[in-house]
Image (cartoon, grey):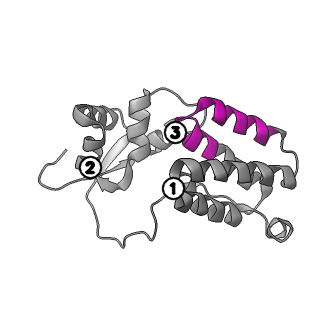
Amino acid sequence: MNDAVDEMLNKTEKGRAELQPGQRSLTQRERAVLLMADGRKPDADLFALFDEHGPALVAGLLARGYLVEETPTPAPAPQRPAVSADAFSGPRSMASARMFLFDLSERMFAPRDKAMAQRYRDALREARDLHAMLAVSREMTADVERMAGSERAEGIRERLARLLPESALETS
């Protein structure tokens, strides 16, 4: 970790795989560091979030291949803060939208409220049609708005709209 130039930390393929549902080989703090490492924050900023534990957590994740340091390249600033769930991509389909919502439940709710995350997972499994799935998505975005603010909830609504089939947007 170079002090002369603030390096940017980013997840490796191994790091992204660790964050998939069902993968739990890291501690909660290590997973939190991994979630925060997006290639846009200098390593010093990430260290500060975890007090005196930051450098050791990052060093361990780097050594085990979950993170990589990259030299920053000038890039335009995003219009709004990135939402980790926004990274999900897939074709326009009910299945893609459903997977996005499962991913959102894991990333947004599971770390904060395991019971809420489980309730949403169960509700999504039971939502057999578009109407039922959209009802669950409205509840989820209302909770996101309550927990993280209206801007984050709006970003999730926009991303969901880009994943739903065109025909679903006309009926919702």
Q: Where does residue 17 sit, x and y in percent of width and height?
A: 52, 39
Provide the residue span drawn in magenta. 104-125
Query: Which label was assigned to residue 75?
Result: none
Label 1: element kind: loop
Amino acid type assigned to the residue bearing label 2 in the image? Asp
Query: What residue occupies the far left of the structure in this picture?
Result: 4
Residue 152 figure quarter = bottom right
Quadrant where the N terminus lies?
top left
Using the numbered discs, state the Cα–Cα distance from disc 3 to disc 2 in whole angstroms.
21 Å
Q: Position of residue 99 (x, y in %)?
A: 70, 48
Near mark 2 (Cα within 10 A), the count class, few <14, some 14-19 or many ≥20, is: few
Q: Nearer the viewer, residue 9 or 45?
A: 45
| Nearest-to-viewer mark from 3 and 2 | 2
Label 1 with label 3: CB-CB less than 8 Å: no
Q: Which residue is tagged 2?
A: 45
Above or below for 134 versus 52: below
In the drawing, does residue 77 fall left or right of residue 72? Answer: right
Q: Earlier in the sequence, mark 3 or mark 2?
A: 3
Which residue is label 1 attached to? 83
- Tag 1 or tag 2, which sits nearer the N-term? 2
Q: Residue at x 29, y 66 (%)?
A: 73
Which label sits on residue 19?
Answer: 3
Local packing at callout 3 (Cα closer than 10 Å; few below 14, some 14-19, many 20+) is many
Work out how far the residue at label 1 is from the one at label 3, CA to CA, in angstroms: 15 Å
State whether residue 144 is above or below residue 122.
below
SS for dot 2: helix
Q: Residue at x 62, y 45 (%)?
A: 103
